[in-house]
Structures are given as structure tokens and as C-alpha cells.
């Protein structure tokens, strides 16, 4: 079936950055399954897949605006170390949920000093061009429950 909104799509994919480094891949695992037209994947890739069919292979370059967004300097914040009371040891790379004006948001610790902790609320791939190589392996109609939830259940999708 040709890919359109409300169709379940299974695909193998490899994601590379501008330098050609592999950031993520389904190679060697099960294909990723998603519900088309429900923002399960980045907009640029979803748009490129519309109208494609099983067996189609495509290479898609997705700009930050159509990917994980631009890097926003205001999402990088230096906060007093006291804000992390109860956390034994704070190290760069640790992830937290932070309360922001836009609601809870995942942040990653980038720098730690004696007095302050710097956290970054940008998506790790914000500001990056995304180079996807994709092969469509299966399409099917969604179950009513999947359509209701807005995502795919079972292999390659959500397990709950
Ligand atoms: Zn669900």
C-alpha cells in the first residue's frame, strides 16, 4: 500500500550526520514501525515517505527546521548546584527532567563546577542536518487502538 496518513509503516533506516558518521541504525535489528501522519518521526522524513511503497529505498537529507530544530542558546542554563540537592554526584552527560515555562523538558548536564551546573535542553541532534537512508519493508492498516493512541504497538513500535 502506498504510504499515506494513518498507515503503519515499517522501515529499515540508517541515520548519518554531515560527516557521514552513523548516529543510529535499525541494521541488524527489527525495522522501526511508525504511524504515518502522527509526528512519530521527524517532519522532513515523514514528508519524503509520503506516496512511497514497500521496497522503495530513499536517501533523504533533512534540515534542522524539518528535523530536531535549531540549537537555542536560551535552552542552555547555568543553575546553582544547590538546585540538585539530593543528587549524590552530578556529572556531565547525566539527564534530568527540568521544569520550564514550556512544561517538563529533558535536559542534559554539560558542565559542573563547585557552585554551578550547566544544563542543555536542546535535543542532542538540534542544529544538525540529518541524512537518512531508508528502505520501506512493510505497510499495513493500523489497529483501532493504535490509531487512538497515535502510535504503533508490537514489534518495532510501543510495548505497553
Ligand atoms: Zn499505545
Image (spheres, rainbow, N blue to C red):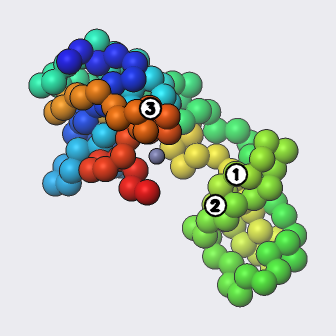
Label 2 to label 3, Cα distance in Å? 32 Å
Label 2 vs label 3, nearer the camera: 3
Q: Is residue 96 toward the left or the right of residue 35 in the image?
A: right
Provide the secondary structure element on which disc 1 rests: strand
Q: Residue 138's spot in the image, x, y percent?
A: 18, 32
Depth order, front residue of 139/100? 139
Query: In the picture shown, does residue 119 fall above or below 64?
Result: below
Q: Nearer the viewer, residue 45 or 15?
A: 45
Element marked by disc 2:
strand
Distance from label 1 to label 2 (Cα)?
10 Å
**Could you give the CA–CA distance between mark 1 and mark 3, rounded to whole angstroms?**
26 Å
Labelled disc at residue 105: 1
Residue sitting at x 12%, y 25%: 55
Q: Which mark is residue 147?
A: 3
- Residue beneath disc 2: 108
Q: Quick one: label 1 or label 3, which is nearer the N terminus?
A: 1
Q: Is residue 134 visible?
A: no
Q: Position of residue 129 (x, y in %)?
A: 45, 32
Q: Residues within 10 Å of mark 2 (few under 14, many from 20)?
A: many
> Would residue 37 be seen by someone viewing this image from the given angle?
yes
SS at mark 3 in the image: helix
Which quarter of the figure has residue 135? Answer: top left
Say which residue appears at 56% left-offset and 40% top-offset: 126
Amino acid at each position: 500500500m502506498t504510504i499515506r496518513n494513518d498507515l503503519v509503516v515499517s522501515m529499515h533506516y540508517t541515520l548519518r550526520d554531515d560527516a557521514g558518521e552513523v548516529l543510529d541504525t535499525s541494521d541488524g535489528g527489527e525495522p522501526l514501525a511508525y504511524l504515518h501522519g502522527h509526528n512519530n518521526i521527524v517532519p522532513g522524513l515523514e514528508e519524503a515517505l509520503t506516496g512511497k511503497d514497500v521496497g522503495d529505498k530513499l536517501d533523504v537529507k533533512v534540515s534542522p527546521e524539518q528535523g530536531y530544530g535549531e540549537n537555542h542558546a536560551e535552552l542552555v542554563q547555568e543553575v546553582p548546584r544547590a538546585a540538585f540537592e539530593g543528587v549524590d554526584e552530578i556529572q556531565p552527560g547525566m539527564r534530568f527532567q527540568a521544569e520550564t515555562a514550556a512544561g517538563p523538558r529533558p535536559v542534559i548536564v554539560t558542565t559542573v563546577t563547585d557552585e554551578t551546573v550547566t544544563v542543555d535542553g536542546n535535543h542532542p541532534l538540534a542544529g544538525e542536518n540529518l541524512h537518512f537512508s531508508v528502505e520501506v519493508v512493510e505497510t499495513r492498516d493500523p489497529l483501532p487502538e493504535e490509531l487512538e493512541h497515535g502510535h504503533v504497538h508490537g514489534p518495532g513500535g510501543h510495548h505497553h
